[in-house]
Amino acid sequence: MDQNDRPVEIKDLNKTQLMLLAILLSFVVSIATGIVTVTLMQQAPTGFTQTVNRVVQQTIEKVSPDYSPNKVQTVIVKEDDLVVDAVAKTRSRMYPIYTSKDATSSILDGYSIGGGQFIASSSALDSTHTYSIKVGTTYAEAKVTAISPIGFALLTTIDPTIKPADLPVGTFGKNSDVKSGQTAVIVSMQKVGKATIQSISSLDPTSKNSSNVIDLSPEVQMKDDGALVVNLEGDVIGILLAKDNSTEYVIASDDIETFIKNPTVDLIQKTL
């Protein structure tokens, strides 16, 4: 008999052919099992059939996950996680300000409010000087375009290589949202502090132009003029300013936004 005409034996099959054969046998056995099972179920008593169906149903319920849309899942969020996120959000909008691009250390931090503008403490700024703001690895020239008597300033980039639209826009909270008992986070590029809001009040209740300040407990000891005070959402609710290099105040955000929207507004009469 010709070798090519003899029946193929299992020992002549390679690994791939053996796997295919096993799959084929499994498929045939499954079909046969199904046919036999259906036939026996049709011939079985009603009580037995109900018992089998109940077992199968309970097994599926245990294996299948519950995707009920009405099921409420409780997610625990730790305050520490919120503080970390608030610090990260705030610092992503903060940039160091230098007296020049050749300076080795920054003099203060600037907070980007969009459009190539930054707010910062005015204590170390001269309106006649041009400063350098480090954006990534680039130094952008900026001028002081407005100084508030309250103690902060507005800087605007004048460097055409920096596109104002590419700079982030800061977010501010409202005085009306500041409540006693809330957690406040004090953020600079170098330090982080945490305190509890006691109250928001006017420095001079007899004057309608008096600045609004936020009282914190414990009192801020960072000695970091120009640091931002933010809530747990990372929205700026105040800025830490020093008066006469001795007393520190947290000026509330509404005063900051009023000045940003109208830098020429008459704030000379504000009491601090």
Image (cartoon, rainbow, N blue to C red):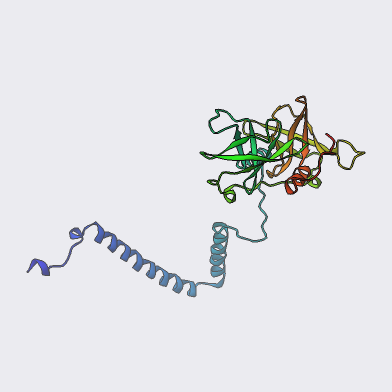
**Residue at the spot 61% in from the left edge and 40% down from the top edge:** 142
The foreground one among 51 and 57 is 57
Task: Report the number of numbered marks.
Answer: 0
**Residue 2, picture quadrant:** bottom left
On the rendered image, what quadrant is the C terminus found in? top right
In the image, residue 73 above or below residue 111: below
**Residue 243, picture quadrant:** top right
**Residue at the spot 73% in from the left edge and 37% down from the top edge:** 152
**Residue 54, picture quadrant:** bottom right
Q: Where is residue 107 in the image (x, y as percent from the top left)?
A: 63, 30
Residue reaching furthest to the left: 1
In the image, residue 165 above or below residue 206: below
**Residue 81 visible in the shown view:** no
On the rendered image, what quadrant is the N terminus found in? bottom left
Residue reaching furthest to the top: 246
Left or right: 215 as drawn, with respect to 112: right
Left or right: 53 as drawn, with respect to 255: left
Q: Where is residue 47 in the image (x, y as percent from the top left)?
A: 57, 69
Q: Position of residue 87 (x, y in %)?
A: 64, 39
In the image, residue 222 above or below residue 38: above
**Residue at the spot 68% in from the left edge and 33% down from the top edge:** 126
**Residue at the spot 31% in from the left edge and 66% down from the top edge:** 24
Residue reaching furthest to the front: 128
**Residue 177 visible in the shown view:** yes
Q: Where is residue 16 in the image (x, y as percent from the top left)?
A: 25, 59
